[in-house]
Amino acid sequence: MLKFLIPAIIIAISFAALEKVRANDSSRRPNIIIIMADDMGFSDIGCYGGEIQTPNIDRLAGNGLRFTQFYNTARCCPTRASLLTGVYPHQADIGRMVHDSGVPGYRGRLNPKTATPAELLGHEKNGYQTFIVGKWHVTPYDYKSRVASDRGSWPLQRGFDHFYGTLAGGGSYFDPVALMRDNEFIKPPRQGYYYTDVISDAAAGFIGDAAGDPRPFFMYIAYTSPHWPLHAKEKDIAKYQGVYDKGWDALRAERLARMKRLGIVDDRHSLSDRDPRVPAWKDVKDKRWQARRMAVYAAQIDAMDQGIGRIVAALEKTGRLDNTLIMFLADNGGCDELLGENDPNRINYYAYPLGDDFLCGNNPQVDPGPRNTFASYGIGWANASNTPFRLYKKRIQEGGVSTPLVVHWPRVIKCGGELRHQVGHVVDLVPTCLDAAGIEYPGFCDKTQLVPPEGQSLLPAMKGQTVTERTIYWEHIGNQGVRRGDWKLVRERGKPWSLYNLAKDPVELEDLTKKNVSKVKELVEAYNAWAKRCNVNTLKPDKTKRKRKR
């Protein structure tokens, strides 16, 4: 009997080994990682023209693709809602931020009639492992009382197997607010904790954990870097000592020249005017302190890039890099928000309980960077971050909605370093994930009828195929926009529409409304139809705006 049993055992072991080889074979469904930076400008990273040292992101770009006309929704919560659902923010019930305004489109948490990639890919029929690390910010959270409500819109309740990160938005990098592991709130250690590093290490750890399971995984990594406050480690800040002494005017010109050499932009892109609120660098009195602000901001991005290097190393160590689709982008353009007692336009940051030991920003007597400071990098540097475009986060002009998109997938992308100039939008990421995994978008999820996705897969573009363009829409706090082909119609709240031909004027410098009345009418009608369909409350913006406490 034993002589028959031993061969059977050997055969069984051989089949088990073969199944493990098949599980790790390049023909299987890919692992998928989406990495999002927070409040990062279009030209900040090296492969998009920036001087900030981002060798790991640049490596992904060099072996992958860079999209030059990819859009977000202009602000953190709405972009995250679209990224996680494949629909416009208002359809996901996060038309503004994460407070409940009591009207459809503005309930402040992910609509239960939407489905996240974790719910779709992680469904028992599809079998993906699902992880999230970093900033969630698509569920109600009261910063003052530090109370989180609506547990049903937390990560694990929306399909993720494991979560390490924060429910809330921005905050201290040394002591983050609403830090969680899975469904439990935890406290970070007082010493040696830096949130950007921990996000990276947690992601690398999840990759190591996933290696013992033959199933593919989906991971969403949402950094808070480089969102204010300006918090960074001194060793990273030191790398940028003196780099920004030249000022924002020279920096913008240098970045534009590099962007042209890289092919990110071309000669149609001229440099927009310096923001009128910003003085010429030669007239700045506190140059050393201003340069320090940008150095800290650069160090925040640098630390994120270092962490992405550790994440890629974990993929290489586990043999999964070749068949992992990585997509890196930002949630909005550079941020012109001001923090500090001496700023007439400062944000009321009552939401962040700082305590008496915090030194508020934009004070030339205090260098930003340490844990007891709380500052932003200001309008002049935000203007440089968004080179060559104008305006910032929250606005629908190119400076507010343009993002880098780096795509890396060695199994599919064979000609690394190429550019893709097709128009894309963050709503495209869910369809891309499903297409890459060979999964059809379902009409229902757990018996709930789903809102149909608005995006389209980027996979054809990755393969160099022609992609049909479509109309893209935006609305945030009364700022509105629509792009159809080369035409973009945009306005700020309370102001008239402006029309631009982006093929000829990609920086939006020449308003063509008076010369193209019929095109304006066409796009306004399209926008109004979309707004009605997608629960956009454009008629009463004040009704859905939370009052600031003074």
Image (cartoon, helix red, strand yellow):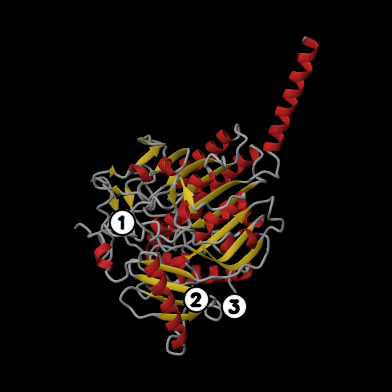
Q: Which residue is mark 1?
A: 365
Q: Position of residue 498 (x, y in %)?
A: 41, 80
Label 1 element class = loop
The residue at which mark 3 appears reads as 267
| Front residue of this view, candidates 79 and 375 | 79
The residue under the point 57% across, 70% down is 469
Label 2 or label 3, whichever comes before in sequence order:
3
Mark 2 residue element? loop
> Which residue appears at 65% of the width and 68% of the height?
466
Residue 14 x/y as whole percent? 75, 26
Res. 206 in view: yes
Q: Which mark is residue 507?
A: 2
**Residue 111 location (% of width, % of height):** 38, 53
Residue extending farthest to the right is 3
In-image side of 33 versus 163 (left or right):
right
Mark-to-mark CA distance, 2 and 3: 11 Å
| Disc on the earlier residue, 3 or 1 | 3
Please identify the residue farthest to the left as the structure is shown.
550
- Is any part of residue 52 visible from this angle? no
Q: Which residue: 42% across, 83% down?
A: 521
Residue 194: image tag = none
Task: Check disc 1 and give the amino acid type.
Answer: Gln
Which amino acid lies under the numbered mark 3 shown in the image of this protein? Asp
Q: Which quadrant, please, contains the N terminus?
A: top right
* Picture residue at 48% right of the left edge, 58% below the top: 452
Residue 405: quarter of image: bottom right
Are there few (<14), some (14-19), or many (20+) residues within 10 Å of tag 1? few
Please name the amino acid that badge 2 sits on.
Val
- Marks 2 and 1, Cα distance to the nearest angstrom? 36 Å
Q: Is residue 534 above or below residue 306?
A: below
Residues under labels 3 and 1: Cα distance? 42 Å
